[in-house]
Amino acid sequence: MIISGESSGELYGALLASHLKELNPNIKIVGVGGAKMQASSVELISPISSAFGLTELLSAYRQIRITFKKVVHCLEVFQPDILILIDYPDFNLKVAKKAKKLNIKVLYYVSPQIWAWRPSRIKTIKRLVDKMVVVLPFEEELYRKAQIPCEFVGHPVLDEIELKYKKLGFTQQDISSGRLKQNLRLNYQKDPSKIMVTLMPGSREHELRNLLPIFEEVIFELSKTDNYFFIIPIAPNLSQKQVLLFDRIKRRFSDQCIFTDDSLESLMASDVAIIASGTATLQAALLGVPMVVIYKLSPLSYFLARLLVKIKHFSLVNVLLDYSIKDSKDIRVKELLQNEVNKNEIIKEILAIIENSEYRNSILNSLFKIKSLFINKNASRRVSEIAQQLCKK
């Protein structure tokens, strides 16, 4: 059984399911996920319950309870050899507790961010989880210090990127190359000489409502020079209501924007990106795309986050630079929070990246160091091997 709760985790579940099938073609996999997991032969118990902020969680509570009951029932009836939990800790640790009572092996893939907030969860993890599989290099030491079996396996984002290269007929050496960018831009049938900006507003409804109006202002201002072209990937597993939030930009900027469901191709073709904090920042880093990272919460969610979260930077790329590279001389990606998230601050950073080659190269150097942490690993394949080993035990 594989359980994911959000779009990024669902992708990791799909990649993992494919590798499990390769190892054992007769395996049966059930789980919580979306279309990608279903396409990888996972029999869905329930669709993913979307994603929520601290205050937004209350409105989805009923659906989460229904999904939880379905999962518990399936654990009791299906009795899987192993339960693989992907991130989504508030839900998944409760599932792990039920699995433990049923003597089902529990493998946790993609750690909760115990290094950022609620570090006491490590005690619960030690009690309920047979093995942790982490995707950030500095996390391994945290669990080993707590005497929890753990392995850093790389990041499935890199697995996804390598699959995309092969599909397009390119290799990793083509990252950020003019040939790759021009090839992809011709697919969009747009002038390859223009500066391409990828705008990634996230997948949560509050993210879309907070950030899409600001993206609209940025597009309007930058379009005045006719030197820019914009591409906006729409995250998978959005509701129809969420997809409709993009309609205003679609109508207003039909000549300047393209909308797609492929975030990787968008980033591969881009000169710069504006990204709502999340896994997409790591995608951009591994593809060598300079970025400005933004985030905007409701006032209450932000207040609670400031009380609970104890880290210097909030974007994954900067966290990796802080915790794994640890070189204070490396430049950090620009982060904008709350009221800083406005057209003037965003455009100021975009222009700095485009017009100041020394600054741009400094950012690219930092991103290259991040990539060096993950090369020569295949997270999905390694997790499938670990799962099989646990089952044999």
Image (cartoon, rainbow, N blue to C red):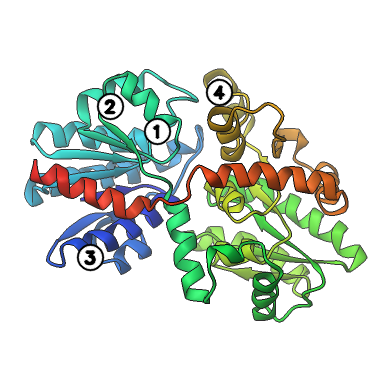
Circle 1: residue type: Pro
Q: Earlier in the sequence, mark 4 or mark 3?
A: 3
How far apart marks 3 and 1 lie (CA) works out to 28 Å
Q: Residues within 10 Å of mark 3 (few under 14, many from 20)?
A: few
Kindly tell me whether residue 236 is visible in this rendering. Answer: no
For residue 119, what is the image quadrant? top left
For disc 1, the marked residue is 112
- CB within 8 Å, label 4 to label 3: no
Question: At x 22% / y 45%, what residue is drawn?
Answer: 386
Circle 2: residue type: Ile
Q: Is residue 384 above or below residue 322?
A: below
Question: At x 62% / y 29%, what residue is drawn?
Answer: 313
- CB within 8 Å, label 1 to label 2: yes
For disc 3, the marked residue is 22
Judge depth for marks 4 and 2 and give the one in front.
Answer: 2
How far apart marks 4 and 3 lie (CA) works out to 44 Å
Q: Position of residue 167 (x, y in %)?
A: 47, 74
Between 374 and 350, the one lying in front of the other is 374
Which SS class for mark 1? loop
For disc 2, the marked residue is 125
Q: Residue pushed farthest right?
A: 225
Which SS class for mark 4? helix
Q: Earlier in the sequence, mark 1 or mark 2?
A: 1
How far apart marks 2 and 3 lie (CA) works out to 29 Å
Q: Earlier in the sequence, mark 2 or mark 3?
A: 3
Between 68 and 349, the one lying in front of the other is 349
For disc 4, the marked residue is 304
Q: Position of residue 170 (x, y in %)?
A: 54, 72
